[in-house]
Image (cartoon, helix red, strand yellow):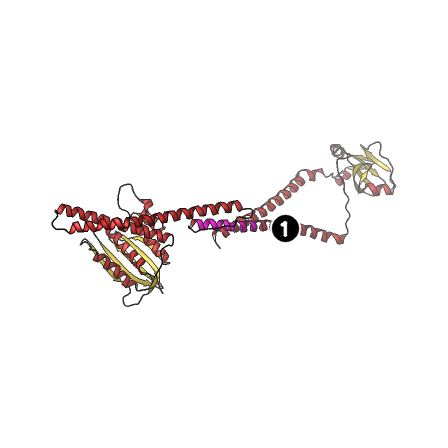
Amino acid sequence: MNKFERFFRRYIFSTVGIILLFLFVNILLVASFFVIAYLGNVKNSNFPIEDFSKHITETNGQLHADTWAEGILNDANAWAMILDEHGDTIWQMNMPEELPRHYSTTDVAMFSRWYLNGYPVNVWNRQGNLLVVGFPQGDIVNYYISVKAQYVTPTAVGFLVAICINILLMLYLFLRNAHQIEKAMEPVLNGIRHLSNGNPIHLEETGELAEINASLNKAGDYLLKKDNTRAEWIRGISHDIRTPLSMILGYASEIEETSSLPETTRKQAEIIRRHSEKLKNLVEDLNLTTKLEYSMQPMQKQRLDPVELARQAVSEILNDGLSDKYELELSEDNPGKAITITGDQSLLNRMLCNLIRNCIIHNPDGCRIQVSVGRCDTVCTFSVADNGCGISEMQLNTLNNNKDISSTQKQTGEIEHGLGLKIVRQIVEVHQGTIEYSNTIPHGLTVNFFLPME
């Protein structure tokens, strides 16, 4: 699963969590509303008709309501009456004048569940009599619902199923839309990733994201054109410099070797030759790093002996005339064991020579350089270490993070590990290897790189 898929998965899961949280909060709010309503208003709004009946007493054949009963009836703005078994009113309080004082069995059956002439009423059985408490019109709403028992369970289950279907439908629609967005965005994200890696792209300029795809195609074409222009410019400069630079080197060497000339002139010719060689190497490095960066360097892979490869690189440095200030040694970590790798001999030789020359260039006062070759499981290990001045911790972190050390260049004119190490990293990468930089104890720089063996 790549980072783009993880992003959409996190987006989907977070949205599902938000929906569940939304449902939970709404259920909690509804439950809280009913609890508060019951504790605050509903509980107190239910008229205590049973207690009210107890406060109506009979004295000498006459019914009387005490002070508490009168007070609670007045507070509710209600009225009350008691009917005997024949439907006649034997007691009343605050009863409206328009209401009749006698009721048939049918009347009682009708108002006991509904209304009495528009007044909502509550009824209570009082020792064979019927206590009726009425409330102002519009104050209370009475509903009477009658459902067959066999339909109660299916109705409840159907209600829950409907809720679940709605939730699942909502989740399905959301996931479907998220998948469509992911499907539409995947080419765009892949295009951005290819652009960041310097690869050409071409997206279909159709659909809702056609404008974005067109912009990415335009940006890709622009970057490709820009890179090609830079590469062609570098190749042209390298070609144009090669001939005059060869002439400068030839004449400078001839002047340097002419014994009839003054020593000062020969010394100046030596300086010209040495700096011209540096310029030549710089142009070659610049041309090579451009070819490696844009995959224009043809790879000529073959089976190689890494020990022999390191020996040739060390011999090349020694044959160039190494100063006595430097000690260059080659060692084998696993002597007697055959090691074989597959790679481009010229590139790998260039990589080792660059590392050794870096040790020489950045330690002008001299140092000891140790080149070693070994193996670890299925990996061939190379190491180039010196006991010179080393590099700073910031530069070390920059190199180990595969960044160009030129970003740490100080404005003091000092020499830095730069283009040569960039070429080393590029050569290691095209051989599917890895490279590590570390400080040599007690001081110096150690470069380890690892290449896969056959």
Residue 363 visible in the picture: no
335 sits left or right of 47 in the view: left
Q: Is residue 318 above or below residue 76?
A: below
**Element under label 1?**
helix
In the image, which residues are magenta? 178-195
Amino acid of disc 1: Leu
Q: Position of residue 332 (x, y in %)?
A: 27, 63
Q: Looking at this view, is 98 or 51 the one in front?
A: 98
Q: Is residue 180 magenta?
A: yes
167 sits left or right of 387 in the view: right
Q: Position of residue 369 (x, y in %)?
A: 24, 55
Residue name at image x 23 percent, y 59 percent: 315
Residue 257 visible in the picture: yes
Q: Looking at this view, is 313 or 256 the one in front?
A: 256
* Figure label count: 1
Q: Position of residue 183 (x, y in %)?
A: 54, 51
Q: Is residue 293 above or below residue 44?
A: below
Q: Is residue 302 above or below residue 273?
A: below
Q: Looking at this view, is 282 or 51 the one in front?
A: 282
Rendering quarter of residue 431: bottom left
Residue name at image x 56 percent, y 50 percent: 180
Q: Position of residue 101 (x, y in %)?
A: 86, 35
Q: Is residue 264 above or below residue 137?
A: below
* Residue at which label 1 appears: 169
Q: Is residue 348 magenta?
A: no
**On the rendered image, what quadrant is the C terminus found in?**
bottom left
What secondary structure do most residues of the magenta stretch adopt? helix
Question: Mark 1: few, some, or many residues within 10 Å (few <14, many ≥20)?
Answer: few
